[in-house]
Image (spheres, grey):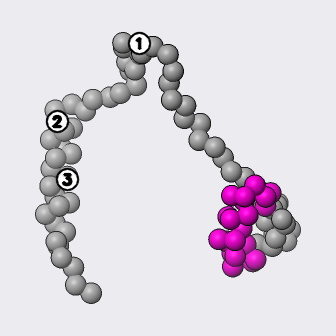
């Protein structure tokens, strides 16, 4: 399916539906490159096999005590400075 940019803007839900069903979608604009929509599958794969103790070392950073206190203060400020009930 090849459509104009204006049509794509007006019928975006239909275009996404077509792409979900495996149809190749190209969006053309005058004097510009053509865009192609494609479905990108997630790259995450569940680990298989044995777990190795310490395999995640260096990948997780634990905040220091001062950073925890700063996050607590920021969270408290965000919760107390915003009205609980807003009226429109």
Q: Quadrant of residue 45?
A: top right
Which of marks 1 and 3 precedes in the sequence? 1
Please tell me the numbered disc located at residue 82.
none
Q: Could you tell me which residue is drawn at 16 percent across and 66 percent down?
A: 81
Q: At which x and y percent is residue 19?
A: 72, 59
Q: Are marks 1 and 2 in contact (CB under 8 Å)?
A: no
Q: Secondary structure at mark 2?
A: helix
Q: Give the foreground label among 3 and 1.
A: 1
Which of marks 2 and 1 precedes in the sequence? 1
Please tell me the numbered disc located at residue 52.
1
Q: Secondary structure at mark 3?
A: helix
Q: Could you tell me which residue is drawn at 15 percent across and 41 percent down?
A: 69
Please tell me the numbered disc located at residue 75.
3
* Mark 3 to mark 1 CA distance (whole Å): 35 Å
* Mark 3 to mark 2 CA distance (whole Å): 14 Å
Q: Secondary structure at mark 1?
A: loop
> Which residue is under mark 2?
66
Q: Magenta segment range?
A: 6-25
| Residue 6 appears in the rendering | yes
Looking at the image, residue 18 sits to the left or right of residue 65; the answer is right
Q: Give the foreground label among 1 and 2.
A: 1
Q: Could you tell me which residue is drawn at 21 percent across and 79 percent down?
A: 86
Q: At which x and y percent is residue 60?
A: 35, 27
Q: Are marks 3 and 1 in contact (CB under 8 Å)?
A: no
Q: At which x and y percent is residue 4?
A: 81, 73
């Amino acid at each position: 399916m090849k459509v104009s940019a204006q049509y794509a803007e007006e019928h975006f839900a239909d275009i996404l539906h077509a792409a979900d069903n495996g149809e190749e979608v190209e969006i053309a604009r005058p004097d510009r490159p053509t865009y192609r929509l494609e479905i990108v599958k997630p790259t995450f794969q569940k680990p298989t096999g044995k777990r190795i103790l310490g395999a995640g070392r260096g990948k997780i950073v634990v905040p220091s005590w001062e950073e925890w206190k700063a996050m607590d203060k920021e969270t408290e400020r965000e919760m107390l400075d915003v009205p609980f009930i807003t009226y429109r």
